[in-house]
């Protein structure tokens, strides 16, 4: 990184141009020189540039443009309304708010992704407090906040709700630290709230009826997602809220909402386009002789539905109720529905427009073959394990993967958990689905080879990086030698995110990747035989990366210290798995990231910053 561009400069505060003054200047120019000459050509060019920049939305384009010269740097900052911070410790809130002064939307990310798999000790950091405090004074017109893997408290949410009178959208993804008390404050104070989306968060039950805190008159709600909230809700208040929210298009319910209650909500909100069904089972047995609601009629009433999810405690007998909307579905999430192949086939055969499909591996290869036969427009597939143990049976295999590759040739993204795989099936996918952008194959057993030939999985993953020219994200597993990493370094020129588990022979494997993948931004490695030599091979590239995570590898404290000394703008965190001091020089977890601020000040005692 160029030294003169790493420091974020303060924007110039320029008052709006005065038309009268401009006219006066023009008149003087005409009188003095007989023709018009702009007295401030650079200022005019900046004004024109600012007007053009208002139409430039890609943050990568904006970042590139800001590096052209100082005036473009200032103009880009002055016109940016959306701020994206991929690592909350890469820049301080003060620096960000001083440079970008007209921001209305903030995206902020905290902990690395491996925190989702309990690989990071709790209370590591990523606190929202310093950010919301800075934004409260700098951005009174803020409208949108999106947080991912951040630690958020009820007090943070209260400050947010009080500070931004025009606040409209709050999305929290994989966040923790807050509860229903904080949600109640947001619901009551943010009178213009359009979006409240809680996605895979850990929400504390404070025994507060947060649903009842929304305005008693009509609301602006367009999206309400709370399927991750693991506590009962006041259904009467929810029903009233839905009834007085005519703009509501997206609603995702938690498992405490029964299928009978779902029927009532759907009848009140036929305009829904996205629906998370809740449990999709009755809250109690229907007395004999009583007639259940016609659930199919409720779905038929919601003619605009294109996205279905939920089904958390599904009773398969209720599944036919969704038949009326299947033909229009573009997204279907069965990742919580423990259903078998026959039950899936009765649904999937109607879903010809499906583009996104998430499912449990309980549907087996047979279920995936049914998907391949019907869903010719499929772009994204995720197959999750119902049993994530390494020694589990694994009901899906190379048979299902190959069927998908042959039937869904428009596929762009796949996440596939399995226990056994073959090179032939992966090679077939690379040839049948050349538009793949994301390929994540998770063979759950450690060091599993091609289960037919016994060979390493090198050739399969090699084919993926060779034949899928648009590939930007790759996750590899199974028995892999340094040859697979050589393929990635040679052909994976667009790969930005690489996840590695239980793979490789030696330091050369990681060296191939770090020296061969110029666009690599995020590198996650666990339980692999890479040590200090491999780590040093990336010195030329670490400043260009967002982060490097290595856990249970062969790193030493001395090797990590050498990296920290060679790269002063890189934060090198050594994380102990527990509160005890390490007994030797080995490093359990290494987390490195670039930062304009240097070491953070809120590191817990199990984190040592070198």
Image (tube, rainbow, N blue to C red):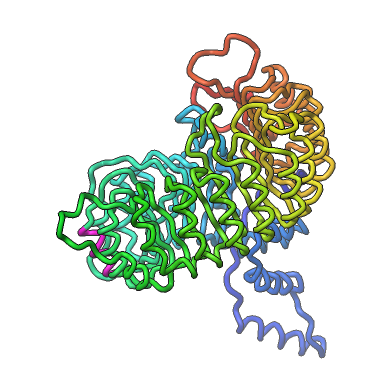
Q: Residue at x 43, y 56 (%)?
A: 309
Q: Position of residue 455 (x, y in %)?
A: 76, 30
Q: Answer yes or no: is residue 596 visible.
A: no
Which residue is at 71% across, 22% downward?
A: 529
Q: x, y (%) of residue 284?
A: 21, 49
**Is 515 above or below relative to 302?**
above
| Res 453 → quadrant | top right
Residue 250 in magenta stretch: no
Q: Quadrant of the C terminus?
A: top right
Task: Looking at the picture, tell me which residue is in the foreground, 201 or 490.
Answer: 490
| Residue drawn at point x = 49 percent, y = 19 percent | 578
**Location of the N terminus (image quadrant):** top right
Residue 111 in the figure: left or right of residue 457: left
Q: Nearer the viewer, residue 362 or 366?
A: 366
Q: Residue furthest top?
A: 583
Which region is colored magenta? Answer: 236-244
Q: Give yes or no for residue 239 being in the magenta stretch.
A: yes
Decide: is 341 above or below 221.
above
Camera-side residue of 469 and 285: 285
Q: Total label count?
A: 0
On the image, the x and y values in percent for residue 35 come to: 81, 88
Residue reaching furthest right?
Answer: 490
Foreground residue, 7 or 453?
453
Q: Is residue 399 in sight in this rendering? A: yes
Q: Position of residue 16 (x, y in %)?
A: 58, 73
Q: Is residue 17 left or right of residue 36?
A: left
- Predominant secondary structure, magenta span: helix
Determine the residue positioned at 32% across, 70% down. Answer: 297
């Amino acid at each position: 990184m160029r030294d003169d561009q790493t420091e974020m400069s303060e924007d110039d505060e320029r008052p709006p141009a005065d038309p009268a003054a401009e006219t006066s200047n023009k008149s003087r120019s005409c009188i003095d020189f007989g023709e018009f000459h702009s007295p401030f050509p650079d200022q005019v060019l900046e004004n024109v540039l600012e007007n053009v920049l208002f139409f430039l939305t890609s943050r990568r384009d904006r970042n590139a443009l800001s590096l052209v010269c100082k005036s473009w740097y200032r103009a880009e900052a002055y016109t940016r309304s959306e701020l994206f911070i991929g690592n909350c410790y890469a820049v301080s809130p003060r620096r960000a708010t001083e440079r970008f002064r007209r921001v209305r939307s903030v995206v902020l990310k905290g902990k690395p992704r491996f925190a989702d798999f309990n690989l990071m000790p709790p209370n590591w950091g990523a606190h929202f407090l310093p950010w919301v405090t800075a934004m409260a004074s700098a951005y009174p017109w803020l409208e949108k906040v999106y947080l991912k893997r951040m630690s958020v408290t009820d007090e943070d949410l209260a400050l947010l709700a009080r500070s931004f009178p025009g606040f409209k959208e709050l999305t929290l993804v994989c966040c923790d630290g807050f509860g229903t008390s904080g949600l109640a404050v947001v619901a009551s104070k943010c009178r213009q709230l359009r979006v409240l989306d809680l996605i895979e968060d850990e929400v504390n039950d404070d025994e507060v009826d947060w649903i009842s805190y929304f305005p008693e008159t009509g609301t602006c709600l367009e999206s309400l997602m709370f399927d991750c909230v693991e506590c009962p809700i006041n259904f009467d208040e929810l029903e009233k809220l839905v009834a007085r929210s005519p703009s509501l298009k997206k609603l995702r319910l938690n498992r405490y909402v029964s299928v009978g209650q779902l029927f009532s909500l759907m009848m009140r909100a036929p305009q829904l386009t996205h629906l998370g069904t809740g449990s999709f089972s009755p809250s109690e047995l229907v007395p004999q002789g009583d007639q259940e609601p016609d659930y199919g009629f409720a779905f038929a009433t919601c003619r605009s539905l294109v996205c279905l999810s939920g089904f958390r405690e599904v009773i398969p007998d209720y599944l036919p109720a969704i038949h009326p909307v299947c033909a229009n579905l573009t997204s279907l999430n069965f990742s919580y529905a423990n259903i078998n192949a026959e039950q899936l086939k009765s649904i999937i055969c109607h879903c010809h427009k499906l583009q996104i499909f998430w499912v449990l591996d309980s549907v087996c290869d047979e279920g995936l073959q049914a998907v391949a036969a019907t869903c010719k427009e499929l772009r994204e597939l995720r197959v999750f394990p119902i049993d994530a143990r390494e020694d589990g049976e694994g009901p899906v295999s190379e048979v299902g993967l190959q069927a998908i590759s042959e039937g869904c040739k428009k596929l762009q993204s796949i996440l596939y958990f399995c226990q056994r795989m073959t090179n032939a099936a992966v090679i077939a996918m690379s040839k049948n689905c050349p538009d793949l952008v994301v390929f994540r194959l998770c063979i759950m057993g450690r060091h599993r080879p091609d289960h037919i030939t016994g060979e390493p999985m090198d050739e399969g993953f090699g084919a993926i990086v060779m034949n899928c020219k648009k590939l930007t994200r790759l996750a590899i597993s199974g028995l892999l030698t340094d040859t697979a990493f050589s393929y990635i370094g040679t052909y994976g020129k667009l790969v930005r995110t690489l996840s590695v588990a239980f793979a490789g022979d030696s330091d050369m494997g990681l060296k191939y990747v770090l020296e061969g993948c110029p666009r690599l931004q995020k590198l996650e490695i666990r339980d692999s035989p890479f040590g200090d030599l491999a780590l040093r091979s990336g010195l030329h590239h670490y400043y260009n990366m967002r982060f490097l995570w290595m856990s249970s590898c062969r790193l030493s404290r001395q090797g990590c210290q050498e990296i920290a000394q060679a790269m002063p703008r890189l934060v090198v965190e050594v994380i102990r798995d527990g509160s005890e001091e390490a007994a030797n020089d080995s490093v359990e977890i290494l987390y490195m990231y670039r930062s304009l601020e240097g070491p953070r000040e809120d590191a817990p005692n199990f984190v040592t910053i070198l």
